[in-house]
Image (tube, grey):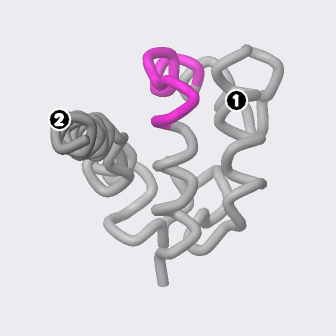
């Protein structure tokens, strides 16, 4: 029983360490969107600060799939999000939703 508890704890720690970090992922976005999502990227996009998580997930997945092209930013954004996993997108969306 003790061995099972140790294995369960180890799995929980590993999962936590592997979880995507929205703040770290957002650093790549800050150059265009601002440190708090307060800027219109390249003067074209909407301000993303405080977007609902669902809206951000939908937008990022659309850019990744190449099916979203808002304000002519589709190709640029597709390159930015190409390597994001679904977990990364979720973490990033959580982070953006909390920006104030």
Q: Which of 1 and 85 is in front in this view?
A: 1
Query: Looking at the picture, how far across and down is residue 30, in whole percent?
Result: 34, 54
Residue found 38% across the figure and 52% down from its top: 22
Q: Is the magenta stretch mostly helix, strand or loop?
A: helix
Q: Is residue 98 above or below residue 7?
A: below
Res 7 quadrant in image: top left
Q: Residue 12: image x %, image y %?
A: 30, 44
Q: How far apart are marks 2 and 1 (CA)?
A: 41 Å
Q: Which residue is drawn at 25% across and 49% down?
A: 24
Q: How many marks?
A: 2
**Would residue 42 be found to the left or right of residue 20 on screen?**
right
Comparing 65 with 94, the one in front is: 94
Looking at the rendered structure, the secondary structure element under dot 1 is helix
Q: Name the residue under label 2.
A: 3
Looking at marks 2 and 1 on the same chain, the residue that comes earlier in the sequence is marked by 2
Q: In this view, does 100 lie above or below 95?
A: below
Verify whether residue 2 appears in magenta: no
- The spot of residue 10 in percent (x, y) is 19, 38
Q: In this view, does 4 lie to the left or right of 44?
A: left
The quarter of the picture where the N terminus appears is top left
- Of 89 and 87, the residue lying toward us: 87
Q: What's the residue at 49%, 17% (across, down)?
A: 79
Q: Which of marks 2 and 1 is in front?
A: 2
Q: Mark 2 and mark 1 in contact? Answer it, CB < 8 Å.
A: no
Write the start and end of the magenta stretch as one range: 78-88
């Amino acid at each position: 029983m003790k061995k099972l508890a140790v294995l369960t704890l180890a799995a929980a720690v590993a999962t936590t360490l592997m979880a995507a970090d929205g703040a770290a992922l957002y650093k790549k976005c800050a150059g265009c969107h601002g440190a708090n999502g307060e800027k219109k990227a390249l003067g074209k996009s909407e301000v993303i600060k405080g977007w609902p998580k669902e809206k951000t997930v939908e937008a990022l997945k659309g850019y990744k799939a190449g099916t979203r092209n808002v304000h002519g930013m589709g190709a640029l954004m597709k390159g930015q999000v190409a390597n994001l996993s679904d977990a990364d997108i979720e973490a990033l969306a959580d982070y953006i939703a909390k920006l104030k």
